[in-house]
Image: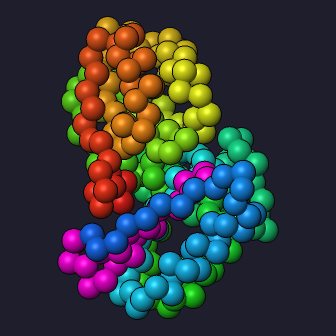
Amino acid sequence: MNVLNLLFTKDGLIYQISKNKSVLEEKSYFVTEETPKDFIEAKLEDILIKQRFDEVSVISALNHFTLMPEGFAAHDTGYDLIAFNAPVDKENEELMLSVNKKFNIQFYYTFPKNFYKKIKALAIPVHFNFSGEKFLNSINNKNSKEIHINLYHNQCEFFAVDQKKIILYNNLDVNSEVDFLYFVMFTLSKIGFGINETNFYAYGETTENETFISELQKFVKNMKIVYDNVPKKNFILN
């Protein structure tokens, strides 16, 4: 079965084509000052017509989201809840829901309607998910205070977990690795996580963000790189 995996980040698109769980092709596209306004949309169109797919899996790491307890059913308030965290354009954003039963939480998130319609137009099975849910479902945690950090290109998401309960989740643009480091430290102080008692776990583009990793290791006692992305083995897509 030919499966197309798509990962949308704040400034990029990563795709993988796999067959029977073996990755056949993978490529990343990122917006720069030189790329046209519709660069990602154009690349998506090219990818969708590359070949005949049997299934599509879409992961959104776009930071338009909110986190709620599992079972929250006032879905009509989803846009308004997300608007507390980020600007919402109802006309151009599709409201989506991802549920994580492992931790009894759910994410409302939005996804660009133009992308949504192009993908759905393939008329084949499509699975949409939010990166936070996918990431959370992949981590192994113990009965301790933990920070799990998933690094992307110019972006990062992280969970604070205590006694197997989600204390905090955020998805941030990382324009400066040092600024993000100080944000993590500030967050720890606000939620009562002591540096020496907290275990840190890093995943994803750890090599690309080696400055952040090396700086973090200067401050924290317990730090482990769980997964570093390598070609054709992108953590969030597999």
Examine the rendered structure and indicate whether residue 222 appears above or below residue 82. above
Residue at 43%, 65% in the rendered image: 27
Residue 165 visible somewhere in the drawing: no
17 falls in the magenta region: yes
Asked where in the image residue 205 lies, by quadrant, the reply is top left
Picture quarter with the C terminus:
bottom left
**Compared to 7, does 190 lie above or below?**
above
The N terminus lies in quadrant: bottom left
Q: Is residue 217 left or right of residue 11?
A: left
Is 138 on the left-hand or right-hand side of 40?
Answer: left
* Coordinates of residue 236 in the picture (x, y in percent): 37, 54
User: In the image, which residues are magenta?
Assistant: 1-22
Residue 193 rendering spot, x and y as whole percentages: 41, 14
The rendered magenta stretch, by its main secondary structure, is classed as: strand
Residue 195 in the image: x percent, y percent?
Answer: 37, 10
Residue 112, quarter of picture: bottom right
Q: Nearer the viewer, residue 102 or 215?
A: 215
Name the residue rendered at 68%, 74% in the picture. 114
Name the residue: 31% across, 83% down. Answer: 2
Q: Position of residue 131 (x, y in %)?
A: 45, 53
